[in-house]
């Protein structure tokens, strides 16, 4: 059986199942101190004074520093922005606030103590006199007259004003349309909520520099940003290590003030410093996701073909611009508004606004769930307006299979796709026709089935991941390339170590990347090790996010393997006294074509590469190759999901009866891991649809900072998913793979909301905002009544 | 700024007795992790909801972040480190988690294993619904739970040889 494409058990698991895996809080260093960061309890306030004198007297306190100490120092830095848009307002983000705090959780001072308990005790003794100010909380209301101003440099709290598509053409499409539908929606703010809180451990040595262990999805990016802006040490004097990382979901991509503060403290005091976020500290400072207010419209001609789509969105940026924040509601959102559909005119306008809340940045899906929600909700409204079945309306508007590559009206060029088979498969698994018949029957005799309302929701989604190529993203404002690196080091005895710039935190790359190497080189998978997550061991790499690791990181490994095979072929041809063109590499052997038995084994060639006793003239010894793979395009996974729900009209409760997910991520390296990614993505999206919301009140207090208030999905609330796939390989990468980590999160919110709105359609309900809490549903069924 | 004197405790952890002097306010989770260096027990929320820190106290799953170390005085604690007989000798429950891909990042896994062991002892042939109810006190953000449910089901079959 081929190694590539089989569900090999993960080699990561034994350590993680036995408790041997070492996460950040499992690490200690001799002489280590603990940091507690004193944070603002106010959403918006002037700092009038800070008194640390009492706190400093606490036994066990090592030092206390404020924003002024940092600002006045040699290594005092700011948190940089990694994606710039035209006319983007980039107010300074000091690593500890100096004059003003701008969200609950903004750091004001840092306490170092001999142990964590003492650090938190002393932090409570730091006296800060604040002058509270009005807060701007809602992303749209923040731009209106009279709203509190988050930054003086950004009038009306506008961080950027961005548009994409042809406005005139779209407007004419609407003017000529036979039908139009409109939608006002709020895409609920969510917490990323990795179960492991963020944390870091910094150690400074004058000669060797700074070693920073941290919860990171991209250690090299963190090192680069720290070096450039936050602590001003040369890049080669910073080593960032990601130990085992307990989930990220985007929240561990960004550079936060915290790792800069901790690094600064380690440099200043000469002692190792560790900081681990408490849960509510994480909730108020991890970059949040979504928080859009959108008005969107769809124009349809007399034949049920879409003639235009337009959307106007206010997207919260929070109090400061997080690392990739400006890209999320723009290039990761506006560009997805064509969905799976052939739409001749699209126009999108996005206003990014500062609010007195935690920053908003990439969270699983990042912009694409928001876009897909708009498109797939409009598709249901459009179908209803046309009197068409939602499946038929989608089918009628799909980009047809022979139209690829397909240039959308919002910049992206889809490289491949085949949407109808995925829809057909999903409908078949669901038993769609029967479901509609059951629904019809229930509506005719509402007393049966306990009066519960049956709803069926579709979501035919497009995902664009493995964002690339670097030259294009650079022209769009990225301050980084989006390639990935791989070094394949073959040892003299033929075993292999791979150094990947990807940085897994649960995705299983140590297994799947070894599968790629074992397959391509015909060696035993146990002869391959995969190293990641350490800037000192691994060449510069971009990390793991945006469903990029297989498509970009995996492809980089293939490129290095191709170079290895090429050099091995040169050596083998020399040893076999044959022409290079006559050598073929197969199943771990370099063979002379058509001459049975004339071959050099993998092991012999590897050994000769290092013995160098008999190499072709001019060939360097060694067998080690590095590649930086820069893809030609994004990859475009797609699929159709079907949610089947029951709504209890008495209580407003939703039960998911079945959930069918048909996804196309191209070739699958390890189907077991693919399925795990689908499941996890679904739970994430269903959580947003039904339960999760990060709620700020008008004063800017996060009222859902703990798990008592923030409703993360639990096992008994979720169904067992019915998954299937179609396979449309990516045409432009060597593995034919596409990303799958975010697909479920992108597809599922509209599937669920469409299902619930379908169930509620007899009550005239056309749209409900997420999360679909029982109260929200009950009120929609019983307008004007009191519960 | 504890004003109460430290207390001596004696706790048996994974069969080994530890004598220690602790602050009365020291959490059991911190005692296990930082004093005994048993870092396999993880801390996710420190308010008793996520379940990552679940250990067994006299055989019963408890949140070690909601207990004080002094409450374990004279009692037996079991942590994830005690489950496998050796590095290549995983328990049937652990083996089932690997077999069914019941973990991704692994951070919540120890708490789930420590919860599911006693559950399976009481319910050797659980339905999916029962497993999901029993899991509802442990949060996992990676897996969407389905593969965990599959793993628990398989572990039941392995343990009770069906």
Image (cartoon, coloured by chain):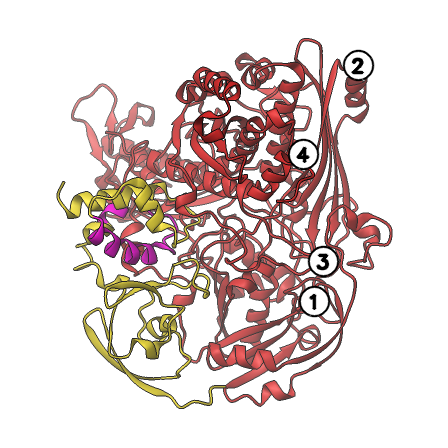
Chain colours: A red, B yellow
| Residue that mark 1 sits on | A42
In the image, farthest residue toward the right: A145
User: Which badge, 3 or 4, is on the more N-terminal residue?
Assistant: 4
Element under label 2?
Answer: loop
Mark 1 — on which chain does it sit? A
Query: Residue B155's spot in the image, x, y percent?
Result: 22, 46
| Residue that mark 2 sits on | A176
Which region is colored magenta? B95-123
Q: In this picture, is A229 found above or below A468?
A: below
Residue at 36%, 73% (x, y): give it. B28
Q: Is residue B118 magenta?
A: yes
Element under label 3?
Answer: loop
Mark 3 — on which chain does it sit? A
| Residue that mark 3 sits on | A356
Query: Pointers 1 and 2 in contact (CB under 8 A)?
Result: no
Query: Pointers 2 and 4 in contact (CB under 8 A)?
Result: no
Residue A681 is marked as none
| Count of marks, rendered view | 4
**Same-subunit check for callouts 1 and 2:** yes
**Same-subunit check for callouts 3 and 1:** yes
Quarter of the image where the C terminus of chain A is located: top right
Distance between the alpha carbons at the discs numbered 2 and 3: 42 Å
């Amino acid at each position: 059986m081929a190694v590539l494409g089989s569900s090999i058990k993960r080699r990561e698991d034994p350590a993680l199942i036995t408790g041997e895996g070492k996460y950040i809080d499992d690490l200690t260093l001799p002489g280590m101190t603990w940091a507690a960061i004193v944070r603002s309890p106010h959403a918006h306030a002037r700092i009038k004074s800070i008194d640390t004198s009492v706190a400093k007297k606490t036994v066990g306190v090592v030092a206390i520093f404020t924003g002024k100490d940092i600002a006045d120092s040699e290594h005092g830095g700011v948190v940089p922005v990694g994606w710039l848009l035209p006319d983007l307002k980039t107010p300074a983000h000091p690593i500890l606030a100096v004059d003003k705090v701008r969200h609950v959780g903004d750091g004001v001072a840092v306490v170092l103590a001999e142990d964590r308990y003492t650090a938190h005790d002393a932090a409570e003794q730091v006296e800060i006199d604040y002058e509270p100010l009005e807060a701007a909380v809602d992303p749209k209301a923040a731009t209106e007259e009279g709203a509190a101003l988050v930054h003086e440099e950004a009038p009306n709290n506008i961080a950027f004003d961005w548009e994409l598509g042809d406005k005139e053409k779209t407007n004419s499409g609407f003017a000529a349309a036979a039908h139009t539908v409109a939608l006002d929606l709020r895409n609920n703010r969510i917490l990323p909520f990795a179960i492991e809180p963020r944390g870091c451990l910094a150690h400074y040595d004058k000669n060797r520099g700074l070693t920073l262990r941290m919860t990171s999805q991209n250690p090299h990016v963190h090192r680069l940003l720290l070096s450039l802006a936050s602590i001003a040490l040369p890049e080669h004097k910073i080593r960032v290590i990601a130990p085992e990382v307990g989930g990220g979901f985007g929240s561990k991509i960004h550079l936060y003030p915290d790792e800069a503060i901790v690094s600064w403290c380690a440099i200043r005091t000469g002692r190792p410093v560790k900081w681990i976020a408490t849960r509510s500290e994480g909730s108020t400072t991890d970059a949040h996701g979504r928080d859009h207010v959108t008005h969107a419209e769809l124009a349809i001609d007399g034949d049920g073909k879409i003639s235009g789509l337009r959307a106007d969105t206010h997207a919260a940026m929070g109090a400061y611009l997080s690392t990739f924040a400006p890209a999320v509601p723009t290039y990761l959102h506006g560009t997805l508004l064509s969905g799976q559909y052939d739409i001749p005119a699209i126009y999108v306008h996005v206003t990014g606004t500062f609010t007195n809340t935690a920053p908003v940045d990439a969270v699983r899906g990042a912009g694409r769930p928001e876009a897909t929600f708009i498109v797939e909700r409009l598709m249901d409204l459009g179908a209803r307006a046309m009197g068409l079945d939602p499946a038929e309306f989608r089918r009628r508007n799909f980009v047809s299979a022979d139209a690829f590559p397909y240039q959308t009206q919002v910049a992206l060029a889809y490289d491949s796709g085949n949407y109808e088979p995925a829809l057909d498969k999903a409908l078949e698994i669901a038993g769609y026709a029967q479901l509609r018949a059951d629904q019809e029957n229930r509506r005719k005799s509402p007393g049966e089935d306990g009066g519960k309302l049956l709803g069926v929701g579709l979501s035919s989604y497009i995902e664009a991941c493995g964002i690339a190529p670097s030259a294009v993203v650079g022209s769009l404002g990225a301050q980084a390339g989006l390639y990935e690196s791989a070094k394949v080091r073959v040892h003299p005895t033929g075993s292999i170590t791979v150094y990947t710039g990807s940085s897994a935190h649960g995705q299983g790359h140590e297994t799947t990347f070894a599968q790629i190497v074992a397959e391509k080189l015909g060696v035993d998978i146990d002869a391959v090790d995969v190293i990641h997550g350490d800037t000192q061991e691994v060449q510069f790499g971009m990390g793991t996010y945006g469903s990029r690791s297989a498509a970009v990181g995996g492809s980089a490994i293939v490129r290095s393997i191709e170079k290895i095979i090429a050099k091995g072929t040169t050596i083998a041809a020399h040893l076999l006294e044959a022409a290079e063109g006559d050598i073929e590499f197969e199943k771990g052997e370099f063979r002379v074509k058509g001459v049975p038995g004339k071959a050099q084994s993998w092991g012999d060639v590897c050994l000769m590469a290092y013995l160098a006793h008999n190499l072709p003239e001019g060939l360097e010894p060694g067998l080690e190759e590095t590649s930086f793979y820069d893809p030609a395009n994004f990859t475009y996974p797609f699929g159709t999901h079907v949610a089947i729900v029951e709504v209890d009209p008495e209580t407003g409760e939703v039960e998911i009866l079945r959930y069918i997910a048909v996804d196309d991520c191209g070739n699958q390296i390890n189907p077991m891991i693919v399925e795990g990614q689908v499941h996890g993505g679904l739970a994430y999206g269903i959580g947003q649809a039904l339960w999760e919301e990060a709620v700020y009140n008008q004063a800017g207090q996060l009222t859902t900072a703990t798990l008592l208030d923030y409703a993360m999905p639990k096992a008994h609330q979720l169904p067992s998913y019915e998954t299937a796939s179609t396979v449309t390989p990516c045409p432009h990468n060597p593995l034919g793979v596409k990303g799958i980590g975010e697909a479920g999160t992108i597809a599922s919110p509209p599937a669920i909301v469409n299902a619930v709105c379908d169930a509620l359609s007899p009550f005239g309900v056309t749209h409900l905002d997420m999360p679909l809490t029982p109260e929200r549903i009950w009120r929609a069924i019983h307008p004007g009544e009191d519960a | 700024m504890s004003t109460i004197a430290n207390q001596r405790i004696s706790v048996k952890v994974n069969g080994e007795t530890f004598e220690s002097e602790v602050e009365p306010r020291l959490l059991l989770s911190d005692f296990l992790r930082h004093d005994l260096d048993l870092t396999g027990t993880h801390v996710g929320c420190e308010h008793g909801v996520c379940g990552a820190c679940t250990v067994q106290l006299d055989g019963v799953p408890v949140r070690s972040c909601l207990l004080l170390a002094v409450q374990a005085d004279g009692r037996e604690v079991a942590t994830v480190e005690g489950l496998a007989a050796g590095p290549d000798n995983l328990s049937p429950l652990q083996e089932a988690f690997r077999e069914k891909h019941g973990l991704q990042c692994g951070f919540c896994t120890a708490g789930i294993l420590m919860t599911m062991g006693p559950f399976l002892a009481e319910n050797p042939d659980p339905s999916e619904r029962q497993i999901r109810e029993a899991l509802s006190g442990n949060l996992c953000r990676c897996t969407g739970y389905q593969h965990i449910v599959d793993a628990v089901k398989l572990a039941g079959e392995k343990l009770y040889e069906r």
